[in-house]
Structure formats: structure tokens, C-alpha cells
Amino acid sequence: MKNQRIQIEIKGLVQGIGFRPYIYQLAKELNLTGWVKNNSSGVLIEAQGEKINELLKNLSHNPPKLSHIEFINTVNINKKAKEKKFVILKSDVGNISTKISPDIGICDHCLYELFDPNSRFYHYPFINCTHCGPRFSITQNLPYDRSQTSMDDFKLCETCQKEYNDPDNRRYHAQAISCSSCGPCLSMPLEEIVSLLAEGKILAVKGMTGYQLICDAHNEKTVLELRRRKNRLAKPFAVMVLDLNHASFFAESNPLANNLLSDWTRPIVLLPKKENILNPIIAPKLNKLGIMLPSTALHYLILDGVLKYQKKISALIVTSANLSGEPLVSEDESAEEKLKDSADHIISYNRKIIMRSDDSVLHIINKKPCFIRRARGFAPNSIRLPYSIPSTLALGAYLKNTFCITRGQEAFISQHLGDLKTASSIDFFHDTLDYYLNYLNTKPERIACDLHPDFYNSHFAERFSKKHTIPIIKVQHHHAHIAAVAAEYAINEPSIGLALDGYGYGNDGSAWGGELFLYQNNGCERLAHLQPLPQPGNDKATKQTWRMAVSMLYQLGYTPNALKHFNNKTEINLVFNLLQKNKNISKTSSCGRLFDAASALLDVCLESQYEGQAAMELESLVTEIQVLKNSWVIENDTLNLLPLFKYLLNCNTAIGSNIFHGSLAAALADWANHYAKKLNTKIILISGGCFLNKILTESFIEFSTKLGLEVYYPQALPPNDGSISFGQAWLAGNRERI
Ligand code: ZN
Ligand code: ZN
Ligand code: FE
């Protein structure tokens, strides 16, 4: 083989994940000389020797586990005569266009050392290496060097410095390296944390990406107290367990679920709950349980401690430390003030969190992982667009907000930011937006926002557009839902888009949420919608689901007496009167409201305490879906489901939930097929919060596939409003005349 020298330029997620040590080790094994360094666009290598091809082969077939190479370019250059070694050079600082790695769950090596009494990292809660540990949450800017992270406050001790400098060590250039003598430390001894938890106390513990409330999941009194303090009376909690064995003790697992649980992203995974193991107050009236494995050494130490203390398989509730509706708390200065009412004790450590993130939540649809919430472990990774568009900033939805910034062919979607309803949520939105705009070093040429005239983000978009003199493009909510799927799968040809959710401001100003579109030429045309229903009391009906049941009754021509299980007769009669007089009524084509109506009619949930409760409880009751023939009518431009509801009126809960899910899925597939045939396409794009319903989604896909349709559903982002910003960006970036 010929001795040659090449320069390799690599772009993608290649910094902060042990890429340079990997190249270094490989070069040494292959007897190559030269150097590797981080630069502003990724990693640059010059390598010389006879086995250059081996190096390239390894790079393409066997790159470091956490890396993501998007671009690689190789050129032959002149050989250097006197070079003896392969070295790692200092990073260049300059025009930054590379990426920050998401935070990475503890790796197996570090986990081993954590519990090895002979390791100098034994029981050290902040152990990490080039393959694991905090990244996004501690990084101020690129390039990823210790001086740009909140580890800059800690001077390395001699031993850590030695490991940091040693190219043969796993912690070579591990920017967050530290040990018990030189790194961050906990504000309370571990033994004390463990005994407080065992005593039933609720602790606020500073995690890697924000403060969390932690307590014993087996202590009913404590869990009820946590619910009271968080003002979270019914919404399910997720639990953390030590390992996969323990996870399978509480929930039905399978190989895919186990892979997800132990993945370095360490998400919460929603799995079928095993009956009678955990107290039902953890996830009341639901047949699923959110479960996760520890993501950091600190969490492992706490769980291991609790386990040894209690001498039984234990689960801890781990939930973000905030009042409902507020964002995650991350600053030590304000933690005391903000958490004193919810936590018995606050446990902190002296490293700053620069970027906060909630836990990510996934579930499994058709044997594939799908997001419910995309945050820690995934942000700030980008999603690849089908092609480059002008740099676009899209400000997302009002609820479950994320924003999206595009740069060339990449779309950076922020972590889940929550509902933009409170001052502190808006602060979180701005802190995160400033951070991304700064580190991505890109100037948006367009700004996109929702069509709704009164959302905070719509107002801000106007101001941003004026300040930077860039055009503003307003995108209808459900157009954005569908475009997000089209962009994810690079679909250009005409297709049918089916958006099902709770609420989106329609082109005509009314409430949309069950929409069928023709998607073509990067735009949506409304073909049909669910038959609009009166929503008595407007917004009140989203919480008081019984109102939608009354509305359904009225539509069917019944009197309130048909609702035998309703106790609030006076209120029902009042609402019925409103319907008769058509007073204080808006109309909605929302699919979410249909779920509310069905759930209330079947006596499952008459009043929702959290978003989606009525639908989730109804879904939990399904044993086997059933399709009721002739229970829907496809009319001119609407899908009419009144016959189905008429039947539900005389159904018991068990049969009703089976029939509702089966018939709705079959009706929707029939409806989509009707238009697909008419428009000569087979492609169906589905999105919207209702597709978080696993049974609805899987049965819709099954029925549609049987009809010869090809269904695409969101995987890179959640189907709920977390993906709106991505869809807005794609439509706005493609707009020709603006
Ligand atoms: Zn590690
Ligand atoms: Zn040290
Ligand atoms: Fe939506």
C-alpha cells in the first residue's frame, strides 16, 4: 500500500463525544502520523501512512457510538518528511458552525467505576468521561472546551489533569472531568438523602438538567402529599428504577422497550403497567406507566442507597420540580424561594446548569419508538431537511412550545419549553432562543408563527420581524402539523394530510382539530373536516368534558335525561338551554372534543384535571377494538360520526371504549381513502395530539394499510404541538413569494 497524506474534513455531531481520542487511537493502531483537531465546522484531520484507507473505512463503518457524521471530505495533500507521531492539536476558535452534543446518560465504564471501591471515582456523583455526562446543560458556546462550560469554575487536580492529558486514557480531553477532590460536590451527604427518602420526605434534588422532586413511589401518604403540593391531582407520575430487571417488575417489557430504557438518552418510556404492583395513585385509571432508568451517577447512587435501605425492589417518583404550568427550576439562587413549598429539603451542588431540559418521554407505536416529549438527550440535535431552505426561525405553538431554527439543510428544534402562559415560561422561551441564535451563529432570513393573532409568540414574531426587517409568515396550526411529517419523510408528491388534535386556530378563525388536507407543493388545502360540534361554554368545555356529552346529546335530538350517570343535573340543564338558544357556543371540528364526549358519555371521565385525561382513561379501557358497521357517514366535506355516538349512548363502558376506538379508526381510514382515491394518491400523512393515542394510531395504520394506503407518522418529533415549529419552518422556508 502506498504511503500518502490526506486531509479529512468532518462535519456533524463530532465534538464533545470522544471523537478526537477515537481518531488518535485508531491512527496509533494503524501506524499513521499527523494530527486531529476540533475546528469551527467539526473535526479536521491530517493523516499520513500506508493504512489511510483503513482509517477511512473505520470512520464510515464504525464511528464513535455517539457521533453523527453528516459530511466527510477527503483531499490528498503533500507528505511531511519529519513527522514521527500522531497528535491531538488545540481547537481553533472562529466562525462556529458545528454542534453541541445533547446530555449523555452515564456509560457502562463509569457506572462500573462508580460502584468499584478501588476506583478513585467510587461513589462520586459527578463521574463522567468522553463517552458520557453533561454536555448541552453545561455548555455556554462552541467549540466544546472546558473554558466554555460551567466546569470552568473547577480547577483540575493533578490526577485529573494527568488523565485529561493522557491520550490513552478514557478521560483524555473529557471536558467535564472531575473527582471528589477537585469537582462539584453535593450539598448533603448521600446517606442523609437516602434516609430522608426512606422516611417519606419529598426532596428537591438538582439533577443534570434541572431540579427534580424525588420521593418514594411506594409511600402513599408521600405521593398524595406530592400531588397536593404540586397541584397535580391526577396527572400520572413517572418512576425511576435501578435497572431493566426492576423495570420489568413494574411494567411489561420487551427487547425494544429495554433498548429504549437503557439507551444513553435515558428517556421515560411509557409501557403497559403491571397490575397491583405499584399504588394506583401513581398513574390513576391508566394502564400504562412511565418508567426510566437513572441517567446520572447521582441518581444511581440514590436508588442504590434506597434499595439497600429498604431491602426490596424500589421505585422513586422523579418529576420536574415546578408548579404545574411553570418551567423547570435550574438556578440555585431562586431554587430556595421557588421550591420551599413543594420540597421538604433542597439538595444542590455547586455546578451551574446553563441550559435546562425536562426528561424526554417516548412510547412505542407499531414497534417503533415515538416521541411524546422531546427534550433531554435529544436537544439540541438537528433534524435533516429534505433540502436547504433560507434560514428560518419558527416560533411554534402556544402550548407545548418549541421553536425551530433552520441552517441550510438542518433544522434545530429546541427542547420542549412548555406552555407560554406564565412570565417564567416566557423567560425560559427567551433564554433558550437567545442561546440557540447565539451558538448556531445564524441570522434568520424569515420568521414564522401561528396564525392566531393573540399568542405571545405571534406578537413576538411581529416585533422580531420589524426589528430585523425580515418577512413574517403566519402558518395555520394544522398545516404545520402535516408539513412536519412531510419534511421528516421528504415527501413532495401530492398526499392526504390528516390532522387530529384539540385545538388550532383555523383559516376562518374558528376552532379546528379534525382536518383533512391535500398536501402538495409545500402547502395545504383543506378538503374536509370532522362535522363541527357546538362547544357549550367555549373553553370551559375542554375541562368539563361532560359539556361535550351534552352537546352530543343535543345534536342527536335527545333530552338531558338520557345522561343517567350525570349528577350535576342543574348545570346540565343550563348547558342544554345554552345549546337550544345557541348562546355562548362556539363550533369546533376538534377530534379531541370527540374523545371528551365519548369519555363522558361512557362515564369514564366527566371532568379533566389534565390535558388528554378523558382520552387517556378511555384508551386504557380498550381490550379489543370493535368496528361498528354504518356508524359514520362521509358527507360533502365532513365526516359525520353521530351514528357512532348514538350507539354509544346505550353501551356499557367496556364495550363502548372498544367500539369507539375501532369505529373511529375505521371511519378515519375510510375517509382518508375516499379522498386519496379521488386525488389519485396513496400517501397519508398523519399528525396532531390525538395520535398520541396508541390504539387509535395503530388501528388507523392497520385499516389504512389494508386499503392500500401508505401512512407516515411523526417519529423524529412528537405528533403533538411540539412539532409545530418544525412544520412552520418548512412551510415558511419554502414560500416563494413573501
Ligand atoms: Zn463514562
Ligand atoms: Zn480531580
Ligand atoms: Fe396541535
Image (cartoon, helix red, strand yellow):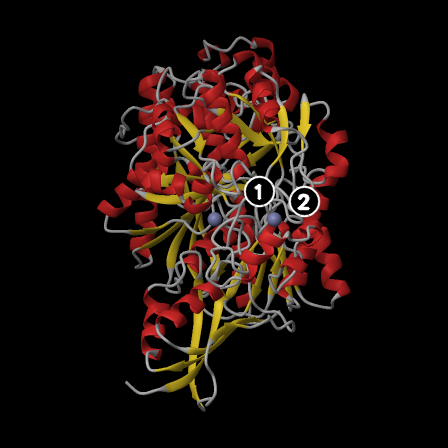
Residue 284 in picture, x, y percent from top left: 47, 19
Label placed on residue 200: none
Residue 458 in picture, x, y percent from top left: 68, 51
Q: Can residue 735 be spotted in the picture?
A: yes
Q: Is mark 1 within 8 Å of ligand 2?
A: no
Label placed on residue 351: 2
> Considering only vertical position in the picture, is 572 above or below 179?
above
Q: Is residue 635 left or right of residue 387?
A: left
Q: Is residue 581 left or right of residue 466?
A: left
Q: Is residue 615 left or right of residue 404?
A: left
Where residue 335 sits, quadrant-wise, is top right
Label placed on residue 126: 1
Instruction: Please count the marks in the image.
Output: 2
The residue at 39%/77% (across/down) is 32
Q: Amino acid at mark 2?
A: Arg
Front-lying residue, 263 or 720: 263
* Crowd band around label 2 with a 10 angstrom C-alpha radius: few (<14), some (14–19), many (20+): many
Q: Is residue 156 left or right of residue 689?
A: right
Q: Earlier in the sequence, mark 1 or mark 2?
A: 1
Residue 41 in picture, x, y percent from top left: 55, 72
